[in-house]
């Protein structure tokens, strides 16, 4: 009897431990508030199965792994006659542990889910072989996905699905792809592509995952940069990065605007599409429990020469120029990252794909 009781207690204890570990694992990566939003028009024009074919013009998922920026404060004469030196601050932060294989696998899974959902609705996927013959792609290059690029967005790995073929206008000096369209807006190419493909629906997906979030920093008497780490699918924001031009102003940064969107277009009327669904986020979609939360600051204030030095040519001031450089590497578990980012991106992609499909 005592032996059976001991066995029962052991089983209960083991079960409790398993439940605790399972609960801990489920809580390890949690998603924040999901606030999707969309803009659509003309969807009633393709109701009742009038459109049965869809061409995927683009499918990009962008993963930030590094960010660096600068701030500069010019010195000079101060009230009272003293002189202050220049101040320059630099800050860089990167992820360690995330590799190309992981982000490629996430992208491939998302694309597979997306295509299966479209096929389940009864759509035929227009092939790149067919698209290669249309007038809209006459002067374009065909590219096969599956290779991660670091050229599209500073500090970001951009992945396209393995075996997915798409078309570009070429690449610039840094290797960044030119997608075509007025002022580089690819959406302006979709009406013509749709028409050339017999009014096929055009699908386009662009998802961006960032982990560095800029914070307002009062510069005061020096140069200051302030950020925090926060893994998320972006809604719409600018990535601030150090300007890498050979000739530039000290402390100058570039801003690259990014967003997450799931788009569908159909037909051509004039220069635009008579039908469109553009799914985005109303606010960032946070992924907790993956990237350690950090608040990082870099601050420098130029030295002050209050008295100066008398010379034959007058008083000479030599304030000290000062700089600050803060670098932080954050370790990340590739498995946790993959699970968290995939869950968030899938929720976003599924929601907008479903919303479009049920409205036509």
Image (cartoon, rainbow, N blue to C red):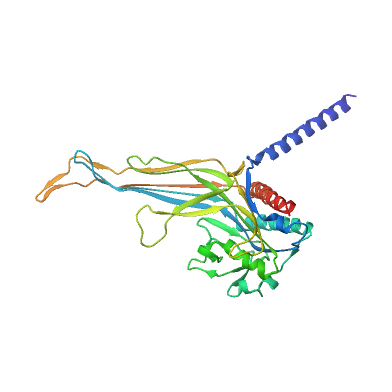
Image quarter (top left, top right, bottom left or bottom right) of the C terminus: bottom right
* Residue 70 seen in this snapshot: yes
Indicate the position of residue 240 as horizontal and vertical percent values: 46, 51
Front in this rendered view, residue 159 or 51:
51
Q: Residue at x 48, y 68 (%)?
A: 173
Query: Which corner quadrant of the image does residue 177 belong to?
Result: bottom right
Residue 267 lies, with reference to residue 333, above or below; the image says: below
Q: Residue at x 55, y 47 (%)?
A: 211
Residue 14 lies, with reference to residue 94, above or below; the image says: above
Indicate the position of residue 157 as horizontal and vertical percent values: 57, 57
Q: Tell which residue pokes out farthest to the right in this image.
A: 1
Front in this rendered view, residue 68 or 268:
268
Indicate the position of residue 142 as horizontal and vertical percent values: 62, 71
Indicate the position of residue 133 as horizontal and vertical percent values: 66, 75
Q: Image check: 39 left or right of 75?
A: right
Q: Image check: 114 left or right of 215?
A: right
Residue 344 lies, with reference to residue 42, above or below; the image says: above
Image quarter (top left, top right, bottom left or bottom right) of the N terminus: top right
* Residue 165 seen in this snapshot: no
Q: Tell which residue pokes out farthest to the left in this image.
A: 312
Q: How many marks?
A: 0
Q: Image check: 276 left or right of 19?
A: left
Q: Residue at x 17, y 40 (%)?
A: 307
């Amino acid at each position: 009897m005592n032996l059976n009781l001991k066995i029962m207690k052991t089983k209960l204890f083991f079960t409790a431990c398993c439940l605790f570990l399972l609960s801990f694992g489920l809580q390890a990566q949690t998603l924040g508030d999901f606030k999707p939003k969309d803009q659509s028009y003309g969807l009633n024009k393709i109701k009742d199965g009038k459109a049965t074919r869809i061409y995927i013009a683009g499918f990009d998922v962008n993963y930030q792994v590094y960010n660096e920026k600068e701030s500069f404060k010019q010195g000079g004469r101060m009230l009272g006659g003293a002189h202050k030196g220049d101040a320059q601050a630099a800050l860089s932060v990167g992820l360690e542990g995330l590799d190309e294989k992981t982000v490629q696998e996430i992208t491939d899974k998302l694309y597979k889910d997306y295509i299966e959902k479209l096929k389940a609705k009864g759509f035929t996927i227009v092939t790149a072989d067919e698209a290669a013959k249309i007038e809209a792609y006459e002067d374009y290059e065909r590219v096969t996905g599956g290779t991660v690029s670091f050229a599209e967005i500073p500090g970001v790995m951009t992945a396209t699905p393995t075996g997915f073929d798409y078309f570009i206008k070429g690449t610039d000096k840094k290797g960044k792809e030119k997608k075509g369209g007025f002022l580089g807006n690819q959406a302006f190419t979709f009406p013509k592509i749709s028409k050339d493909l017999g009014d096929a629906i055009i699908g386009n997906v662009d998802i961006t995952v960032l982990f560095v979030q800029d914070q307002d920093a009062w510069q005061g008497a020096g140069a200051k940069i302030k950020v925090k780490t926060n893994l998320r699918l972006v809604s719409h924001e600018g990535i601030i990065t150090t300007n890498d031009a050979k000739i530039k102003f000290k402390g100058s940064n570039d801003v690259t605007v990014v967003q997450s969107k799931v788009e569908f277009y159909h037909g051509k009327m004039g220069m635009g599409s008579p039908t469109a669904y553009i799914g985005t986020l109303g606010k960032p979609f946070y992924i907790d429990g993956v990237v350690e939360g950090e608040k990082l600051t870099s601050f420098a204030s130029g030295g002050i020469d209050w008295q100066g030095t008398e010379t034959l040519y007058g008083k000479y001031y030599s304030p000290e120029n000062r700089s600050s450089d803060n670098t932080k590497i954050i370790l990340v578990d590739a498995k946790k990252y993959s699970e968290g980012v995939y869950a968030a991106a899938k929720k976003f992609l599924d929601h907008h794909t479903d919303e479009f499909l049920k409205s036509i």
